[in-house]
Image (tube, rainbow, N blue to C red):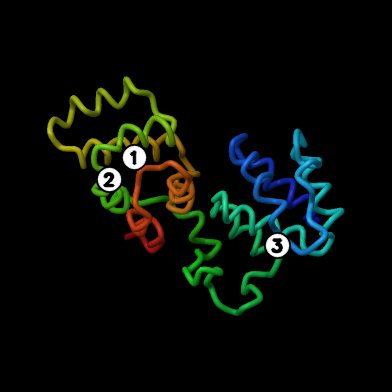
Amino acid sequence: MAMGEQVLHFLEDLREKEFEKFKFYLPHEGTAPHIRRGKLDGASRIQVAELLMQTYPQEALDITNQVLHKIPRLDLVQGGQLQAGGETGNSGNNADRTGARKPQAHERKILVSEQQLMKLAGNMGKTWRQIGIEFLGLENHFLEQIEENNPGNTKLRAFHMLLEWKKRAKQDATAIHLCSILSQDGVPLQPEALDCLRDTGGA
């Protein structure tokens, strides 16, 4: 797949809010000349991909990865880096710029385990309903039913809510994808609460 096609593929995977964040961060990435913000206002995904290829013909994919890391869409970042630098990467190790371990390609396909979900549920507390509705796309009436079925046990409520997300997400219910969703701005979780999702070995 050509670099421009890869960039467009990643942009098409972004939700609308994520795409707007991508355009916000993009002018700050790469070396001069930077893409001016005025060119990005109202630009479509195809137009943004074309701007990246015109401005950075050799670095477009790397810059795309840098911006995806900030959004964050970590599930897309790893895929792009594998395409750009090969499976071994340029550094010969499996760490990103922050020093954190990046998942191998096969790990990105591993579904999140119930053990990981239970650990995550224990860190949600009373915010579980907000997370379920606002970030996981679950309906309030469904969460009310979970609440009734698990009286007085917040951890189990959060766990069953996460299980429903896993059921609906199907093959996309990976630890990496869930970590990406819950790393967004506004999610009421401490960063260390997601450590269990970064343990791609299965908890």
Decide: few, some or many residues near mark 1? Use Cα within 10 Å; few <14, some 14-19, many ≥20. many
In which quadrant of the rendered view does residue 2 lie? bottom right
Q: Give the residue drawn at x 64%, y 64%.
A: 82
Q: Is residue 19 above or below residue 195?
A: above
Q: Secondary structure at mark 1?
A: helix
Say what amino acid the circle numbered 1 marks. Leu
Q: Is residue 188 above or below residue 151?
A: below
38 or 47, nearer to the observer: 38
In which quadrant of the rendered view does residue 156 lie? top left
Q: Is residue 152 above or below residue 148?
A: below
Q: Are marks 1 and 2 in contact (CB under 8 Å)?
A: yes
Of labels 2 and 3, earlier in sequence is 3
186 or 129, nearer to the observer: 186
Residue linked to disc 1: 162
- The x, y position of residue 17, in whole percent, is 59, 36
Residue linked to disc 3: 62
- The x, y position of residue 20, in whole percent, is 64, 39
Residue linked to disc 2: 121
